[in-house]
Image (cartoon, rainbow, N blue to C red):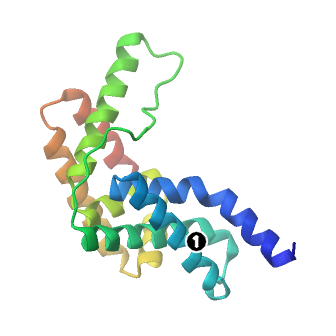
Amino acid sequence: MSIEQNILEKLYHQHFNKTFRTAYLITRDYQLAEDATQEAFLRAFSKLSTLREIEKFGSWISVIAANYSIDLLRKNRKIFLTDQISVHAGSSPDDSPQESWEKNETSREIREALFLLEPGDREILVLKYFNELSIKEIASLIEVPTGTVKSRLFRARKKIRVLVEPSEAGKRQIGEISTKY
């Protein structure tokens, strides 16, 4: 095995789960997410020489996967609703059963609301909160000004808030998300 092939294999194994999760959160379909992930790695590996900092490979491939996922959705024009995704609610061992249940319920409500958003809104939220990219990183990767990223995040969070409004636990969780920004 050549050194280059070994590096590509390590990058693949190191970033596969995050890349797949990004694609899945946008497409909401296992097969489409699998296709988007494979295509993202093919595209990234073929253009690897254009990446200036290899440390940014994870963020870079997440954006490639997100963009390709949106392209697949546009091409297929399908809406997929599923509850098979696992999003960590952030409950700790010190939480009471009631607190743990509320966090899990809130996570489910936010996940369902996320699936109701347009792909572009889902993409910006996935990159920010699931891939934990900074606004500056997102702006650089999707090639828009930071102000555009901020306004898109604001609008997407507002849409999520409206969708989960009836639930007090959802309001708390959304408030926590918006304070991270």
| Residue type, numbered disc 1 | Phe
Q: Position of residue 44 (x, y in %)?
A: 58, 77
> In the displayed structure, does residue 172 sit left or right of residue 162?
right
Rendered image quadrant of residue 126: bottom left
> In the displayed structure, does residue 113 sit left or right of residue 50?
left
Identity of the residue furthest to the top in this view: 97
Mark 1 = which residue? 41
Q: Position of residue 139 (x, y in %)?
A: 41, 74
Count every numbered label the image shows and give the total: 1
Q: Position of residue 47 (x, y in %)?
A: 60, 85
Q: Position of residue 73 (x, y in %)?
A: 29, 67
Q: Quadrant location of the C terminus?
A: bottom left
Residue 31 seen in the figure:
yes
Image position of 129 with respect to 105: above or below: below
Image position of 161 with respect to 23: above or below: above
Q: Quadrant location of the N terminus?
A: bottom right
Residue density around tag 1, few if under 14, some if 14–19, many if 20 or more, within 10 Å: many
Q: Residue at image x 35%, y 63%?
A: 123
Image position of 173 with respect to 179: above or below: above
For the residue labelled by badge 1, is the local secondary structure a helix, a strand or a loop? helix
Rendered image quadrant of residue 51: bottom right
Residue in the foreground of this view, choosing between 166 and 154: 166
Residue 174 seen in the figure:
no
Residue in the foreground of this view, choosing between 104 and 155: 104
